[in-house]
Amino acid sequence: MSVLTFFLNLAGATMLLLFAVRMVQTGIERAMGPSFKRMMTNEKRNRIQTAFIGMLLAIVLQSSTATALLATGFAAGGFLTIASGLAIVLGADLGSALVIQILSFDLDWMVPFLLAIGGWLFLKTEKRSLRQAGRILLGIGFILVSLQMIGAASEPIRESEMLPAMASYLGSEYITSFLIGAALAFIMHSSVAAILLFVTLVILQVLPVEAGVSLVLGANLGGAILPVWLSRGMSEFSRRIPVGNFMLRGTAAVMALFLVNLTPVLSIFDSFGPGQYLVNVHLSFNFLLLVIGLPFTKLMEKPLALLMPEPSENGKTDIYKPMSALDRSVLNSPKLALSGVTREVLRMGQIVEVMVHPVMELYKNFDKERMEKVRKMDLEVNSTFSDIRRYVAELQRGDLTKADAKRARDLAEFSINLENAGDIVAKRLLVLAESKNLKNLEFSKQGWNELVTLHERVICNIKLAFSVLISDDLEAARTLIEEKTEMAAMERRSRKQHLKRLREGGEISFDSSNIHLETLRNLKELNSLFASVAYPILFKSGQLLQTRLIGTMGPEHSHDGDDNNDDDDDDD
């Protein structure tokens, strides 16, 4: 019975650990938002500096996987080379090892402070940045609580007769331990959480140090597999980054496994306690991997290109073009039909997202051929919109429940907004980019940074809008509307700063004034169109008022016809 209790309590503690790591990561992502792109895509840095940025991001996000996926996404958008992406991910692997080093210290005394301060900031403050700071502090507190729970869970089994046999087996069968470590890191979707679990179990003497080392090396393999799996739907070019990292980190983990189990190389760590022993092995492994692997990042570009070639454009692209999800054979099954509409709306939105990505690049380095490609994508957006509108009309002629009919209307309305968003990019922003190029205009440095920041924010919010569309998650919907409010505030601030520069006589700002202000307005409108996906969810849950106007007006505020004279008002 004690074994069953152990596994049940361990499962609960592990889930809390995963939730806490995710909570910290979410808080930091929402607090920093578009800053990640500027940090990761600076082409002037060398490989060492780029790896250092990756290390910092992994420490901030508490996840090398999240950093790898960010790098993969930026590579997909053409903002990052494969060599730079690999350098970032190798640095991120070392950064996640440093996170484990920090969390392995005895920080139990901090738990009440973290929970009290974090809870107050998250629940009692309205400012977005303070709420996210509270989320981060709560997440760190929950990580420490989960580690305490793992210790408490292991108490009943430490005297179990089964434990010595299990520990002895894992200690001697290092390949089995290695595979278990890889599987757990993959299943938990976090090598940080998995290794913290192994370190805690070794400290509590539930597992021998030998087994812990093999488990930790296995977790490094699992941590390399995870980005490959999560990026499986992205372009072949961008997926070269996680695959290259898997080749480097996976090969190194296998080689290290045999090295540490067949030679006395780990004797240099004998002076450390069991937990620190494991942490130091993990830290040393990732440091050596960075030092040895960094020179190979550029050399790996050609082998990865051969292994994962991009699709050729000589007539084969149409063969692999995504098929429409609007299946007329399921019109009599509303649930299936609505699922197809959702998929098609998502595809339509992703086309618009691809159109939005290069806008600022076209402002900076105008390319007419690239502009025409983006404009052609708007034709596909319009065609998809027509198909969705026709399909939803046919669906609504059938026998729908009230909920299904509302879902169909909501999807149709969002598709209208997506079509408008495509028009904003193709018929407004691209026109402004072309006009800026023809007139040879420049923005002030501050004005350009303001536009780039707003553009990056729009891209982040587009991704969040897709998550809301698929998940119907209430918290994500609220966050999206908060982002809309923040975007409006940023647009106002930028407009005020621009007008201030004009008053101060900035010639550059004056020449490009119209384009600057128009770009601000269009980016704000573009963001609002994507944020509209959140309104049906918030209305349904009672989280949004029908109107911002007060419910009633007193007779002293009413006017009849055109009579606006104060003398005619009745005195109460």
Image (tube, rainbow, N blue to C red):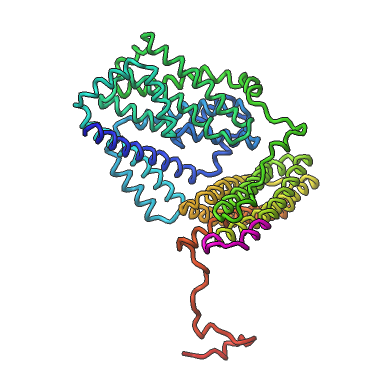
What main secondary structure does the magenta stretch of the protein show?
A: helix
- Tell me where residue 410 appears, x and y as whole percent: 58, 59
The answer to whether 348 is drawn above or below residue 265 in the figure is below
Q: Residue furthest top?
A: 263
- Name the residue located 72 percent from the left edge and 42 percent from the top edge: 362
Outermost right residue: 438
Residue 134 coordinates in the image, percent (x, y): 39, 47
- Residue 112, percent across and down? 28, 44
Point 39% across, 25% down: residue: 181
Quadrant in which the N terminus appears? top left
User: Residue 444 location, x and y as percent?
Assistant: 67, 46
- The residue sitting at 51% across, 34% down in the picture is 67
What count of labels does the image hold? 0
Q: Nearer the viewer, residue 258 or 103?
A: 258
356 is higher (above) or lower (below) than 551: above
- Residue 497 visible in the picture: no
* Quarter assignment of residue 103: top left
Relative side of 435 to 153, left or right: right
Based on the picture, tell me whether residue 391 belongs to the magenta stretch.
yes
Q: Which residues are magenta?
A: 389-404
Q: Can I make out residue 61 in this image?
A: yes
Q: Is residue 495 left or right of residue 548?
A: right
